[in-house]
Amino acid sequence: MAETAQLTRHIESYVASSSTPSHQAASLDAIGLLIKTNALTLEALVIGLDMYLTSTDAVIRSRGILLLAEVLTRIHSKYLNSETIHSLVVFFKERMADWQAVRGALVGCLALIKRKSVVGMVTGSDAKAIAQSFLLHLQVQSLGQYDRKLCFELIECLLQHHADAVASLEEDLVFGICEAIDAEKDPECLLLAFHIVESLAHIYPDPSGLLASFAKDIFDILEPYYPIHFTHPTGGETHVQRDDLSRTLMHAFSSTPVFEPFVIPLLLEKLSSSLLSAKIDSLQYLRVCSVKYGSERIAKYAKTIWSSLKDTVNTYLGEPDLSFTLAPIDGIDFPKNGVVIEALSLLQELIVQNSSQLISLIIDDEDVNFIINNISSYEIYDTISAQEKKKLHAIGRILYITAKTSIPSCNAVFQSLLSRMMDNLGYSAINADGLQNGGIFTSQTVNFGFLYLCIELLGGCRELVTLSEEKHGTYCTILHSFSAVLFNAFGSVLAVSAGRCPRDLDIYIGVKGLLILAMFHLDVFPIPKSTFENILKKFMSIIIEDFDKTVLWNSTLKALFHIGSFVQNFSDSEKAMSYRRFVVDKIMELLLRDDIALPFSLKVEALSDIGMTGMKNMLTILQGLEGAIIANLSEVHKSLKSFETAVQLLECYSCKLLPWIHENGGAENFVVQFAVEIWSQAGNCMDFNSPFEEKGLLDAMMTAMKVSVGCCSVESQNVIIQKAYSILLSHTNFQLNEVERLPLTLGKYDISLRDEGILLLFTSVTIALRPKTHIPNIRGLLHLFIITLPRGFVPVAQALGSMVNKLISKSNDTENSGEFTLEEALDIIFNTKIQFSSTNMLQRCNGSSNGSEMVLTDFCLGMTNDRLLQTNAICGLSWIGKGLLLRGHEKIKDITMIFTECLISDRKSSLPLIEGSHENTEEQKWDPLARKCAADAFHVLMSDAEVCLNRKFHASIRPLYKQRFFSSMMPIFLHLISRSDSSLSRSLLLRAFAHVISDTPLIVILSEAKKLIPVLLDCLSILTEDIQDKDILYGLLLVLSGMLTEKNGQEAVIENAHIIINGLIKLVDYPHKTLVRETAIQCLVALSELPHVRIYPLRTQVLRVIPKCLDDTKRSVRNEAVKCRQAWASIASSRSLQL
């Protein structure tokens, strides 16, 4: 009874005229759930609906029928027996005669047709009965859009799921479908209609059968839709796109060969359309239809299609990119054009389908023969007329496609056209052997047209060889016989003499041709080994001798790189061995020879590019590079040249080779060996007193070491750090083994260059370690780093930051394992007392001292009254804080409070002055430089570091750490800024605020925009005073720009429009950075979009300032100024019109 009452309530809720769509959907879901859970049977539902299904009220009857139909869609996975399904089919097909209930009948039939066999499906006879009732009772085009869509869906399902049953309806089915489709305009319905036509072709596949008699009628219905001109509103409810409709219509056209007499003439007619989309569609349709209709039917159109294709390519093919970029490797690089791409795709398909016919048309074509017969007249590119250039480019593209399509087509163009070109130019009469053995053309004996077409033919041929399973053909024999001629022809245009330097175009043609010749597939190898080696020799001679010809040298190096990358795919082939002999070994020889004029920087560039052609070549390069670096490091204290050479080689290794090794893998053993060798030389190369110190050797060694360690595994890193630690122990005066028992005295502010260099090199290892790598004597190292930190060694601070970022936190497991923990490290860093004696001597205290004892934070707070020590300590603490911030450690709060104390404190020193300190005459004040350093510490905390504490060096980075830090610091900053009564403190707080906000993701800032904008504008005002703040200023402007352009920030911007515009006006002539002026003007343009009531009063100010920017020295600023003046002038004019 409860279910019956519940059912009645749901039925009444659905049928009631006042029911909303959401209530109806809820009722349907509830009834469907009752049936699926067996709380209600379908029979019971039908009985409950009886009065609604048979009501004389059309509205109630239609709703009742629709309710039953919709329930069926919701129980599609519920098993129904055949009797039930048959009864429902009979009911719904009869309802098709009731035009007022037709929607429910369609939905019900569709739900039944879609059912799977495992849950009970409609039989073939029932499906046929549904189709007959549909054809008898429904006039589809008289229905509304949604009902027509249901009709098409029903037909489509019948054709797909019960094709055999409905196929017996024959003429009635086809005629009914034609009548339903005719004059349809809705995109969604058309999509289904085109599918239905395609399905019809599958049901009646016989070309001379039933569909043939209706072909003209169906085509007449479809023809008006071609080409698809989609005018449906973009913001409409339909999700159908023009391309979807065009694709389905194409499939309908190509679904059966019986459409050929009607479709192909239509497509050829539309191919001459001036509408690009129609032209592209015609080419696509022709390609697909030619495949489906078959070669016999298309053969009669071949000549017409060829003529149209040739004209289309000639018209729409753009000017080629004849530059030394060498992309792509095969053929010539042309601008992308949809018409040309489709035309060449169609040509390729026709050649595959009707090879002999199309090849004959191409070879016998009047324009093709004109180009071939007059090839000798195209000697210089610039002297060729524009019309003949276009024709040359078009014929070249066509020959490229022909050569790459099939073996027969490639054989034909090589036999006919290449041989004829050779004969026309007289090259075949030249003794090829003599050329190969040393003879060469002069540049006057070859011409552009010949070389250009050769590149297109060779490029197509090479692509065919690469993609085709069948590798050999007549073209191989022809190419082999002419290889020496082609080598000398291409090589001659690259010849450099005292009176001639090849033009960029000649360089492109010559290098491109030799490159393609050298890169044929190994299985074919249509050019002799000697020719391949001659190409390598030619390129290497350019690398060695013609280094002053920048374009030629760069393009040649790129060609060698492409050849090397290609032959490495066949590492044991003759080509690969020749490449290693003539290129790789020669490059290594160049590195070691001083009697060659090639500048060392170019040697290094060539070395790195050739190394990156493959792992074998890279290992060879690395071995030679290691020897050269070690040899030069051993001589740095004697020779400035060795010093400079070592720096360049180390930079090449770190910036180019190591990233490649890391990406491709397989050379870690070498990287470890190289790092160990560097450490073996560290003691010697650091032991000099320096005229070369400032040249950057130590920086280069540190970078190379850091990147090397970073790309190694834990096991390899353990090997490297053990070696580094042994050198640190044996080659320095640091008493690491006794550091915890004895004071560690390092003298005054200076330590020896040797000790400093080895220490800093050691920090580069520490920075790049993985978290699980074991650090030897970590306690001693921490004490060493702490005692040297106040001396201003930034890498030491970065090493400390990396250590606290990666050490494990204290837990039961770590206590049992005895591993060194983060908590122990922090205790050493922040609680180790350092003695600051009267002679400015720093030492670690061991319980007795004759000076002042203090910890690291005391140095930051200026307790020593020593400016340099305070600045260095603050800088060091910022990197330690960064390591903690990245991992989300609570200690960062204490560190930021120390920095904040530095920013706001004007108090006197809490310690008496130490005798001999820098200033001991008056009460010591906080040093402005140190306080500025504290403000800049926030930049260290928030910025993304490249040299340490990043993913590359295995830092532990907690998600959203910037957002959390911003949220914790902003209230503090805003409070302190508002209460600051000191101009210096306020400016420093604003500086720190600027650093934090500049590096915070914009989405977080937008939520606080109302509070931040006034302070941000104060920052802009403060930062304009010092040229060194230009980068911070630009970062803040980017933040402001984001607020102006994002919707979430609009409200705050509108409220503060006046002060924002006033602030930006002051920046439009900022002299120290172009991007600041440009961005400020862009912001003013964005502000012009605000409501007029807020910005109209300010238009005069803006329009008075902007004209000055029109005379800016930078074009980008002038362009933005023009946009700004137009935007603000339009505000004034529109306001005048309103008045």
Image (cartoon, helix red, strand yellow):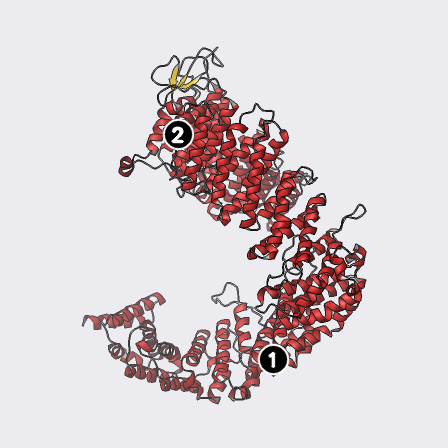
Q: Quadrant of residue 729?
A: top left
- Decide if residue 323 is on the left or right side of residue 843: right
**How many marks do you count on the picture?**
2
Q: Quadrant of residue 53?
A: bottom left
**Residue found at the very far left of the displayed protein:** 1
Residue type at numbered disc 2: Ile
Residue type at numbered disc 1: Ser
Q: Is residue 561 visible?
A: no
Q: Position of residue 975 (x, y in %)?
A: 41, 31
- Decide if residue 99 is on the left or right side of residue 392: left
Label 1 belongs to which residue? 295
Q: Nearer the viewer, residue 933 or 55?
A: 933
Q: Nearer the viewer, residue 259 or 2?
A: 259
Q: Position of residue 266 (x, y in %)?
A: 63, 78
Q: Secondary structure at mark 1?
A: helix
Label 2 belongs to which residue? 895
Q: Position of residue 1123 (x, y in %)?
A: 63, 46
Q: CA distance from mark 2 to mark 1?
A: 80 Å
Which is more foreground, mark 2 or mark 1? 1
Quadrant position of the N terminus in the picture: bottom left
Q: Nearer the viewer, residue 676 or 463?
A: 676
Above or below, 668 against 285 in this view is above
Return the disc, 2 or 1, that comes first in the chain's sequence. 1
Q: Position of residue 58 (x, y in %)?
A: 35, 80
Above or below, 732 against 969 in this view is above
Q: Nearer the viewer, residue 874 or 417?
A: 417
The numbered mark at residue 161 is: none
